[in-house]
Image (cartoon, rainbow, N blue to C red):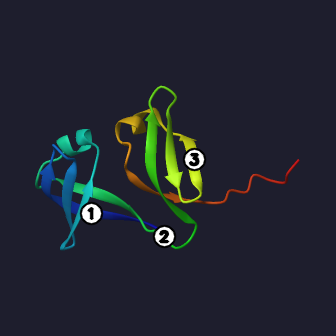
């Protein structure tokens, strides 16, 4: 489920990327890329694209063990083994070794098997 929420920036730490946003009286704190945080200031009105997912359905916890900017890949350690996946070039600046991640496994119908 996705929702678009309007909020107001109440705190910014541009050295860590932490941003606090007041959405209808509730403060939501999250870490953003440093460049994003640097562009924000207290009092700014922002829109938050909120995605809600049940972590008990089709998700796998993992941790990033490698980010390869030359190949635009990252390797994630999961409970059943390592998985290397392609990533967008811009993501190599935001994802770091040791980051905890959650993999959401959506199924896509691409038609019948050959």
Q: Is residue 39 something that shows in the picture?
A: no
Instruction: Specify whether 33 is left or right of 78.
Output: left
Gap in Å between the C-alphas at discs 2 and 3?
19 Å
Gap in Å between the C-alphas at discs 1 and 2?
25 Å
Instruction: Specify whether 14 is left or right of 66.
Output: left
Residue for point 37% across, 50% down: 99
Q: Which mark is residue 83?
A: 3
Instruction: Say whether disc 1 or disc 2 marks the residue closer to the N-terminus.
Output: 1
Q: Is the residue marked by circle 2 packed among few (<14), some (14-19), or many (20+) residues within 10 Å?
A: few
Percent x, y of residue 20? 18, 59
Residue for point 44% across, 47% down: 64
Percent x, y of residue 65? 45, 44
Percent x, y of residue 1? 48, 68
Instruction: Say whether disc 3 or disc 1 marks the residue closer to the N-terminus.
Output: 1
Residue for point 21% across, 72% down: 24
Instruction: Specify whether 47 is left or right of 87.
Output: left
Q: Secondary structure at mark 2?
A: loop
Residue matched to label 2: 55
Q: Quadrant of residue 79?
A: bottom right
Residue matched to label 1: 6
Q: Secondary structure at mark 3?
A: strand
Asked if the residues shown at circle 3 and circle 1 are in contact, with their CB atoms under 8 angstroms apart, the answer is no
């Amino acid at each position: 489920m996705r929702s678009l929420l309007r909020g107001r920036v109440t705190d910014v730490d541009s050295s860590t990327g932490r941003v606090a946003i007041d959405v209808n009286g509730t403060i939501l704190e999250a870490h953003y890329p440093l460049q994003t945080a640097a562009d924000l200031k207290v009092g700014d009105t922002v829109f938050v694209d909120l995605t809600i997912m049940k972590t008990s359905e089709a998700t796998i916890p993992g941790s990033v063990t490698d980010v390869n900017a030359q190949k635009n890949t990252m390797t994630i350690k999961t409970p059943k083994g390592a998985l290397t996946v392609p990533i967008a070039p811009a993501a190599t600046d935001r994802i770091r070794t040791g980051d905890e991640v959650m993999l959401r496994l959506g199924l896509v119908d691409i038609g019948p098997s050959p």
